[in-house]
Amino acid sequence: MTGQKVWSTGAATADFGLLLARTNWDAAKHRGITAFVLPMRQPGVQVRPLRQMNGHSSFNEVFVDAAAVPAGHVIGEPGAGWTVARATLAHERRLASFPPPPATATGLAWQQAIAERTAAAEPHKWYPQRAGRPDLVIPQARSAGRSADPIVRQEIARLIELSWSARWMADRVAAAKAAGQPPGPEGSLGKLASSRIAQQAARVHTLIAGTSAMLTGPGSPLGGIIAEILVSVPGISIAGGTDEIQRTIIAERVLGLPREPDASKDLPFRQVRAG
Ligand SMILES: Cc1cc2nc3c(=O)[nH]c(=O)nc-3n(C[C@H](O)[C@H](O)[C@H](O)COP(=O)(O)OP(=O)(O)OC[C@H]3O[C@@H](n4cnc5c(N)ncnc54)[C@H](O)[C@@H]3O)c2cc1C
């Protein structure tokens, strides 16, 4: 297996990766892809962490050079990797966060598992800021003496309105999951709502803090957290599929609008023009 992939979150600490590889160049582009479990710790796999604009390094470039994949590591049918990818992404979009360990998680195996997860989560400790930290908006407005400002109040109300409707939608998704239904396009509604909430929260934080929102270090608003919010929020509109792609999924699979035209849909992949 040979190739290159950018943006792989957690690859630097992963033992295994989910790899989608083109295995048939004569099939149409959505067919002819196979999903594999790639053992990451082997000489043919090199991982280079990327430094993001918020200073963290949670995603990576992965270089695969004649790496070996055991025959039993194919997921699903050969050539049906697109189905695997869609199911994986639907789960990713519905997954709000890791569940906390249960109260009974006290044994040695649990301690080791929690320590391993904490170490693996270290590069991702900015994730709360990526969501815009709506929880900090009202305390910040109060401590900055801006809570009586009508413009600030109006923008906070808009944020609360977005957050509550997203929470009710998440409750509906959780109920569907509890009823054993597979994840569907509703994950895209939740993903898009998270982007809008994060953007609105970042907007209100800026309105409250003014230009000092850009400062980091001692004396900066919330010890640099507001600045970290501003440079982390854009990522949520990209990760797991961009806002535009979520809108297309919602249009086609929730609203039933005609599919986006795609002239290359049925062409053999080797005839599809790149770029
Ligand atoms: C924090 C973070 C973590 C990530 N983690 C992972 C990871 O673990 N694994 C992984 O594989 N990837 C990961 N990604 C990558 C992410 O999934 C992709 O960057 C994202 O899906 C967009 O794909 P792209 O970069 O190829 O952009 P492109 O598809 O090239 O899109 C570029 C622009 O064009 C727009 N666009 C593209 N197609 C259409 C269309 N049909 N209609 C309208 N607009 C369109 C997009 O919305 C975007 O604005 C991560 C990204 C971020 C920011």
Image (tube, helix red, strand yellow):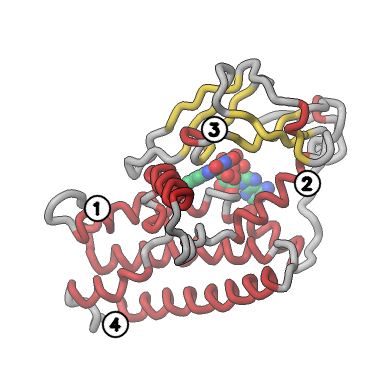
Q: Is residue 65 above or below residue 180?
A: above
Q: Amino acid at mark 2?
A: Thr
Q: Is residue 48 left or right of residue 63?
A: left
On the image, the x and y values in percent for residue 191 come to 57, 61
Q: CA distance from mark 3 to mark 2?
A: 21 Å
Which residue lies under the disc numbered 2?
A: 83
Q: Is residue 170 above or below residue 39?
A: below
On the image, the x and y values in percent for residue 82 come to 76, 42
**Dots 4 and 3: beta carbons under 8 Å?**
no
Q: Residue at x 45, y 66 (%)?
A: 103
| Callout 4 secondary element | helix
Which residue lies under the disc numbered 1?
A: 214
| Crowd rating for badge 2 (residues with CA inside 10 Å; few <14, some 14–19, many 20+) | some
| Callout 3 secondary element | strand
Asked if disc 3 is less than 8 Å from ligand 1, the answer is: yes
Residue 150 occupies which quadrant of the picture? Answer: bottom left
Q: Residue at x 83, y 27 (%)?
A: 24
Q: CA distance from mark 3 to mark 1?
A: 28 Å
Q: Which of the two discs, 4 and 1, labels the residue nearer the N terminus?
A: 4
Q: Residue furthest left?
A: 219
Q: Nearer the viewer, residue 83 or 205?
A: 83
In the rendering, which numbered label is found on residue 6?
3
Q: Which of the two discs, 3 and 2, labels the residue nearer the N terminus?
A: 3
Q: Amino acid at mark 3?
A: Val
| Callout 2 secondary element | helix
Q: Is residue 149 above or below residue 68?
A: below
